Image (cartoon, rainbow, N blue to C red):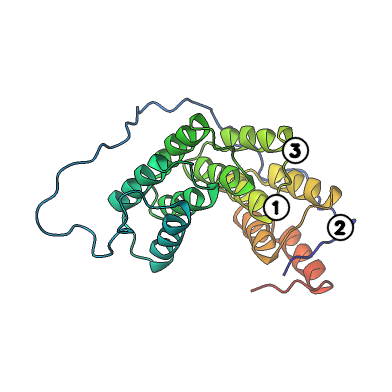
């Protein structure tokens, strides 16, 4: 359940653990999309694809959705599904692409998320808030928080509305860097601009303050949470 705390800014005492610099570097590994390879007579994927020669967007949408929800979609099959989606004309909506990117994030193939998102853009598929938030999450997971903020800037330039997931990914990235001051500043900006936050967002902020020995600030935030309809886990 989404909630907001208005006018509840956080402040750190002098001497708090703050800046740990993050350096930005371009992706050094060149990624190449896999071409189809001949498989043995044994069916590599126990879940058959839509049987038509040229499956429709709707049938592939449903198939991708079901495979992603199954919890056993592997890396190779995810890439194969991407390949099949790119071959459909007209191109499907961004929804099945986003679902597959989410799977790649879960199995920690972050650089493939960057590469495939680039291919989507080149194919004319305009990113939405889910796609861009997934990119932010991936950059933060590999420690490139500065690139995550660059994607956030792209969100604003495109006129898209950041959601709680967008900020939670950024807060996690900043928190991993041990930058308590930046966590505080970002969280306060969320409150100032009335952006939505949820219990996960608060949990990330509280955890970040605890890890940087700002337990007093963390306790203060939890007390403020108790006065709202947001309950801590």
Quadrant assignment for the C terminus = bottom right
Rendering quarter of residue 147: top right
Quadrant assignment for the N terminus = bottom right
Q: x, y (%) of residue 158?
A: 71, 35
Local secondary structure at mark 1 = loop
Q: Which residue is mark 3?
A: 159
Q: Is residue 9 left or right of residue 230?
A: right
Q: Which residue is mark 2?
A: 8
Residue 171 showing in the rendered view: yes
How many numbered circles does the render carry?
3
* Picture layout, residue 86 above or below residue 62: above
Q: Nearer the viewer, residue 218 or 62?
A: 62
Camera-near label (1 vs 2) is 1
Q: x, y (%) of residue 220?
A: 79, 64
Q: CB of mark 3 within 8 Å of CB of mark 1?
A: no
Q: x, y (%) of residue 151?
A: 62, 35
| Residue 163, numbered circle | 1
Residue 213 showing in the rendered view: no
The residue lying furthest to the right in this view is 7
């Amino acid at each position: 359940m989404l909630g907001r705390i208005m006018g509840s800014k956080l402040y750190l005492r002098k001497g708090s653990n703050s800046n740990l610099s993050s350096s930005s570097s371009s992706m050094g590994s060149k990624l190449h999309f896999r071409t189809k390879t001949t498989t043995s007579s044994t069916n590599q994927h126990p879940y058959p694809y839509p049987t038509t020669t040229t499956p429709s967007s709707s049938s592939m949408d449903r198939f991708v959705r079901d495979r992603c929800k199954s919890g056993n979609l592997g890396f190779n099959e995810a890439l194969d599904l991407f390949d099949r989606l790119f071959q459909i004309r007209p191109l499907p909506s961004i929804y099945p692409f986003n679902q597959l990117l989410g799977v790649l994030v879960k199995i920690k193939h972050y650089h493939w998320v960057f590469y495939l998102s680039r291919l989507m853009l080149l194919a004319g598929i305009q990113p939405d808030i889910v796609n861009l938030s997934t990119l932010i999450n991936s950059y933060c997971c590999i420690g490139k928080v500065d690139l995550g903020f660059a994607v956030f800037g792209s969100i604003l330039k495109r006129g898209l509305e950041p959601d709680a997931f967008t900020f939670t990914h950024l807060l996690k990235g900043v928190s991993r860097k041990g930058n308590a001051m930046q966590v505080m500043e970002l969280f306060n900006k969320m409150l100032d601009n009335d952006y939505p936050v949820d219990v996960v967002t608060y949990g990330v902020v509280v955890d970040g303050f605890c890890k940087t020995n700002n337990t007093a600030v963390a306790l203060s935030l939890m007390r403020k949470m108790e006065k709202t309809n947001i309950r801590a886990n």
